[in-house]
Image (cartoon, rainbow, N blue to C red):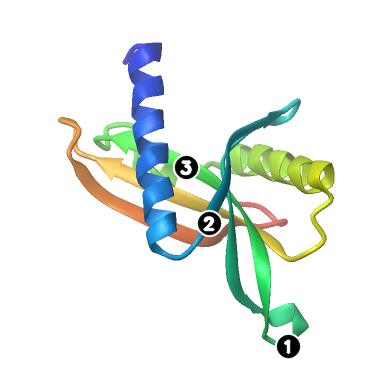
Amino acid sequence: MSADARRGLGKRGEELAAAHLRDAGLTIVARNWRCREGELDLVATEEAADWSQGGARATWLVLVEVRTRRGDTFGTALASVTPAKATQVRRVAQAYVQATGWRGPWRIDVVAVQMETQGRLVAVEHIRGAVTGDGA
């Protein structure tokens, strides 16, 4: 697949992921945030319980890695979140939190967009807290 085709597939996956997150009640606040460590595909907020605070409602910062795959010859979209990728996403997420001075709860989610080889959408899967501080 050419670099242009890969970029187009990634852009389509990010659009589908953003729509899926909006439908789930999240608010997209940034796209393609870049820093020296890399890029965050989507940044969102979500009103949800913060169990570290006894379940009180809080605004969560949600840093999202979107993985898009067409076909499964090279593995599924979700399987493409390797330990190395998780480490890199953690670094970028921490840079975002530090750069913005975010003080509330935050997490790293993955949205896996799986398509058939012809490009028809098969599934969009949102995994909350998919990347944690102790590995993928």
Please state the horizontal and vertical placement of residue 20, each as a whole percent of the image.
37, 54
Distance from label 3 to label 1 (Cα)?
Answer: 30 Å
Please state the horizontal and vertical placement of residue 114, each as a whole percent of the image.
30, 44
**Disc 3 secondary structure class:** strand
Q: Residues within 10 Å of mark 3 (few under 14, many from 20)?
A: many
Name the kind of residue labelled 2 in the image: Thr
Q: Which residue is mark 2?
A: 27
For the residues bearing labels 3 and 1, Cβ distance under 8 angstroms: no
State the residue at coordinates (74%, 40%).
Answer: 91
State the residue at coordinates (15%, 30%).
Answer: 118
Q: Residues within 10 Å of mark 1 (few under 14, many from 20)?
A: few
- Decide which of tag 2 and tag 3 comes sooner along the chain: 2
Q: Residue furthest bottom?
A: 54
Whether residue 129 sits left or right of residue 112 in the image: it is right
Whether residue 46 sits left or right of residue 116 in the image: it is right
- Decide which of tag 2 and tag 1 comes sooner along the chain: 2
**Disc 1 secondary structure class:** loop
The image quadrant where one finds the N terminus is top left
Name the kind of residue labelled 3 in the image: Val
Please state the horizontal and vertical placement of residue 82, each as a whole percent of the image.
54, 41
Disc number placed over residue 11 in the picture, else none:
none
Disc number placed over residue 54 in the picture, else none:
1
Disc number placed over residue 66 in the picture, else none:
3
